[in-house]
Image: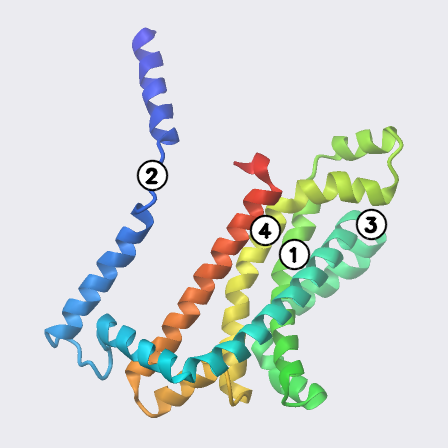
Amino acid sequence: MEKQKQVITNRVAFLDKKVPFYTSFLGIAGILVLWEIVSRIGIVSPLFLPAPSNIVITGWEMLVSGEIYGNLTASLYRIVLGYAIGAACGILIGLIIGFFRTADAIGTPIVYAIYPIPKIALLPLFILWLGIGELSKVTIIALGVFFPVVINTFSGVKSVDPMLVKAAVTFGSNRINVIRKVILPGALPMIFAGLKLAAGTSLLLLVSAEMIAAQEGIGSMVLHYGNLMITSKLMVGVLILSLLGLIFNRALRWLENKLIPWKE
């Protein structure tokens, strides 16, 4: 018996063991080193796969010349505004259709009917309706963010323990207080899962929209240098998009830890 307890204790200690903070960077560092070697010794032509060191040098030159600022500013404006609108609407609609039965009966079939449509396929239609300016691009990003958030919010609301809702109603809470103090906190883990998923979707739609109908932006820059076969500058754009995705993910994780401390 004592031996069995010791085995269980060791297993639990293994599960609780913290990983050093630098472990996350080891995989990336290994890939970069391998990439540099492959490019330097000529296994793959630098025209098709420039070395990471060359990409960094090119990126610094583009940063100093100011070429990156205009494209990055345009992309950040579109993605931040589109993401904020899509996320806010998704959370609101998800709470409504998750909590109210009539809204569920009306809204859920509509959401699941439109969700499978590739959102970028609607961009020409939005350009026709809203023009080729910023509004069509922001709208397509907001639409792409809306669906993962609304579906996850709806699922989060449905996963809340009904006994908690009944207890709140029994103690005299009205519907608004039940949503604010019981439903929303209980659904937050699923909401953040949707927000993280939507962050990746927003980047995909941003690049696609900028490649199709934009003169400025990281996606437009990537397409331009791809057409010119200037691979190093193309990869700078790809690197910027990767960093944006990483920053969004870290920001959402930080916000999640602040709003859902009990999840840890």
N-term-proximal mark, 4 vs 2: 2
SS under mark 2: loop
Tell me what residue is drawn at x 25 percent, y 71 percent: 52
The residue pinned by badge 1 equals 151
Amino acid type assigned to the residue bearing label 3 in the image: Arg
Amino acid carrying mark 4 in the image: Phe
In the rendered view, tell whether residue 145 sits above or below residue 187: below
Looking at the rendered image, the disc whose residue lies closer to the viewer, 1 or 4, is 4
Cβ atoms under marks 3 and 4 closer than 8 Å: no
Q: Which residue is mark 2?
A: 19
Residue at point 74%, 57% (across, down): 92
Q: Quadrant of residue 164?
A: top right
How many numbered marks appear? 4
Given residues 159 and 175, the one toward you in this image is 175
Q: Nearer the viewer, mark 1 or mark 3?
A: 1
Of badges 4 and 2, nearer the viewer stands 2
The answer to which image quadrant residue 105 occupies is bottom right
At numbered mark 4, what does the secondary structure look like: helix, strand or loop? helix
* Cα distance in 3D space between marks 3 and 4: 24 Å
Q: Does residue 162 appear left or right of residue 169 in this picture?
A: left
Residue 201 pos. (x, y %): 53, 67
Q: For residue 192, which numbered disc appears in the image?
A: 4
Circles 3 and 2: CB distance less than 8 Å?
no
Q: Residue furthest left?
A: 41
* 172 versus 217 height, above or below: above
Q: Specify whether residue 118 is in view.
A: no
| Mark 3 or mark 4: whose residue is earlier in sequence | 3
Which residue lies under the disc numbered 3? 101
Left or right of 89 in this view: 54: left
Mark 3 / mark 2, whichever is N-terminal: 2
- In this rendering, the answer to whether 37 lies above or below 152 is below
